[in-house]
Amino acid sequence: MNYEETIQYLYDFAPMFQQVGTAGYKEGMENSFLLDEHFGRPHRKYATVHVAGTNGKGSVSHLLASILMEAGCRVGLYTSPHLLDFRERIRINGQPIEKEYVINFVEKERAFFEPLHPSFFELTTSLAFKYFADKEVDIAVIEVGLGGRLDCTNVITPLLSIITNISFDHVNLLGNTLTAIASEKAGIIKPGIPVVVGEAEGEVKEYFSGLQEKIEFPGCLIFADEQDIIKSSRLLPSGFWEFETKKYPHLVCELGGFAQEKNAATTLCALDALPVPPVPKEAVYNGFRRVIENTGLMGRWQIVGQNPKIVLDTGHNIGGIAYTARQLAQEKYRRLHIVFGMVKDKDISAVLALLPRNAQYYFTQAAIPRALNSKDLQTQAAAFGLKGEIFASVATAFSAAKQSAAADDFIFVGGSTFVVTEVLEKLQSL
């Protein structure tokens, strides 16, 4: 098989959760441990950092990887989902895994893994861990796929665990209370291993505080939002953030979006907690300033056009859309156009309630089984005063928005990672 055939085989053999929903999710760790044993527990050959959370874990993972790269480390980075190419999930120093490695892995190992019927994520996690070992990385930043306690990445024992925040998402799998979701995310915590919690308040803060007594790691639990790390911040004309901290004055972050204030604080707190030699200040500055260049991160308040300004963002749950709504309220424009689609298993009503009413909506659906029908989305949105037309595809919705928008208008694309993906694919084809 060539690369395209190999990837199609993986999609067909083990459908992605992101594409098909719960049908692609396997509860339990049995396959993860069997695969891990088969490959000789490759993650033990390098240091790891484990990153969980409802929102922000992708940005924090990429920021950490970028900083460690600038510090001279050979850094593996495992994240999900991908936007344009499967190989985005598995990178070393920003470079995606080689096509030939993916092909050879599947050809050599399929006789072992096919009888196990692993999920797509179980299989690709094993691929990533083996790849990092074979390529002799110094450290790997590992992003949790879903939850934490039963996530197949949880076979690792990291130098540091990070839980960015807790919000409502995947409630059918993780629980319908914040405490229940927190307990699943907290499943990545290991005795004696430091853990940084980025954001926590109320019942979530109480839950994590209680873990200090239940798990034997006194002093290892650090709340980033108690450290008073970022003194002030401002959004630069470039769309980048500039943060003022006692340790790093005038720290510029290449990532846009209001969520990056919290992500930056979490990342800086994690750097201080990471039990390795101190990272040079220059590496921190360069890591923040070059995070997209270093890691290839896309879809985080990504500006892809001007006159009209066009922004893509992969925020897709209550916590993520809340940041989106805040930032849209700060933008200056004549008219706001929103290309919007969601998947069926999100809290649709809660998300729609956060969106601005002073916008022309282009309701659409990504070309995946999980996508919410655009007509259903339009109907539900109407109950919140959101008005717009429906479009059968993301491409036609985006084209319609561009045709309708004047130079001083603003076009936002979001609601689903897959809506953003299809717009990126369209832009790439132009």
Image (cartoon, rainbow, N blue to C red):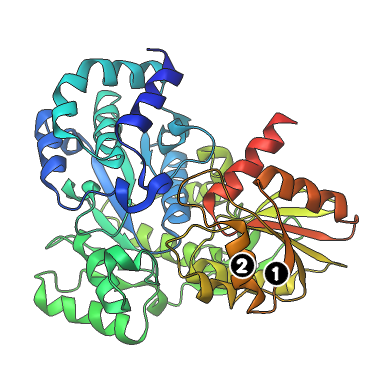
Residue 141, given in percent of the width and then of the height, sits at: 34, 45
Marks 1/2: CA–CA distance = 6 Å
**The disc label shown at residue 75, or none:** none
Left or right of 209 in this view: 141:
right
Q: Amino acid at mark 2?
A: Thr
- Amino acid bearing label 1: Leu
Task: Classify the position of the C terminus by image quarter.
Answer: top right
Report whether residue 365 is seen: yes
The image quadrant that residue 213 belongs to is bottom left
**Residue under label 1:** 328
Q: As rendered, which of 314 and 341 lies closer to the eye?
A: 341
Tell me the tag on residue 324.
2
Task: Assign the N terminus to one quadrant of the image.
Answer: top left
**In the depicted structure, whether residue 340 falls above or below residue 293:** below
Q: Residue at x 46, y 60 (%)?
A: 344
Q: How many marks?
A: 2
Q: Is residue 80 visible?
A: no
Residue 405: where, in percent of width, then height?
A: 86, 56
Residue 221: horizontal and vertical position, in percent?
A: 24, 71
Residue ID at (74%, 65%):
388
70 lies left or right of 183? right
Extreme residue toward the top, this view: 1
| Residue 273 spot, x, y in % from top left | 30, 61
Could you tell me if the residues under marks 1 and 2 are in contact, i.e. CB atoms within 8 Å?
A: yes
